[in-house]
Amino acid sequence: MIRQFDTIAYDNRLRTIRPEQKVIFALLLLMMAITGNWKTQVMMTIWLAIWIIGYARVSWKVYAKALRVVALFLMMSFPALLVSIDKSFHVSIDRSQIFIAMSLLSRSVAAWSCLFFLLVTTPFPEILYVLKRMKVPSIIIELLFFMYRFVFVFEKAAEELYVAMKARNGGNHWRHGGMLVFQLF
């Protein structure tokens, strides 16, 4: 999936816009997503989805797949936000936390939308170039570059392990996925 995002970043319709403009635009929207209320965050998410799918011509299937992954991680964190356990190990759901959890959900999705916009419309080397021009310390740029390269190595290793597991008649059970992750790390 990472290679697919990289390909989309080079082949989208917003590719001709200068990377400085897209980075500044995404950072301003990110600040608005962090500080705004939930209505602003929802509107921003919808607006960026229109930009990503409509103007940049990123496939809605790719967008939905990435949004599903984000939703999975957010839903996995919901129990930790809503459930409280007291000293006598009594488990309860605090109703006052529901609003806070929903606020966190809208803020997280809005922030993800801003960063996903930047990811699929701007190639990563151009983002690094913009950061260098913004006088970001070179050690941070180097670390970002190494992490970017490591993600591709990590994805390739995971793909090879998956093919090896399938070749040994590995199944589709969730335990096999757990073994794959264990071997990868």
Image: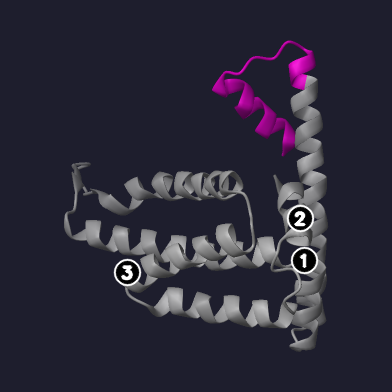
Q: In this view, does 56 lie to the left or right of 101?
A: right
Is 183 in the magenta?
yes
Q: Which mark is residue 165?
A: none
Q: Is residue 86 left or right of residue 146?
A: left
Q: Residue 6 carries which label?
A: 2
Q: Residues within 10 Å of mark 1 (few under 14, many from 20)?
A: some
> Cα distance, mark 2 to mark 1?
8 Å
Name the residue type under label 3. Answer: Trp
Is 176 in the magenta?
yes
Q: Is residue 35 left or right of residue 84?
A: right
Q: Nearer the viewer, residue 182 or 43?
A: 43
| Image spot of residue 34 (x, y percent) | 44, 75
| Image spot of residue 78 (x, y percent) | 35, 49
Q: Name the residue under label 1.
A: 124
| Image spot of residue 118 (x, y percent) | 64, 68
Q: Mark 3 points at which residue?
A: 38
Give above or below for 72 relative to 170. Answer: below
Name the residue type under label 2. Answer: Asp
Which residue is rendered at x = 78% and y = 24% of the image? 163
Contact between labelled residues 3 and 2, with CB atoms less than 8 Å apart: no
Give above or below for 70 relative to 178. Answer: below
Name the residue type under label 1. Answer: Phe
Quarter of the image where the N terminus is located: top right
- Of callouts 2 and 1, the N-terminal one: 2
Contact between labelled residues 3 and 1, with CB atoms less than 8 Å apart: no
Which residue is rendered at x = 56% and y = 48% of the image? 60
Contact between labelled residues 1 and 2, with CB atoms less than 8 Å apart: yes
Which residue is rendered at x = 45% and y = 60% of the image? 109
- Of callouts 1 and 3, the N-terminal one: 3
Give above or below for 146 relative to 68. Answer: below
Q: Main secondary structure of the magenta part?
A: helix
Residue numbers of the magenta segment: 165-185
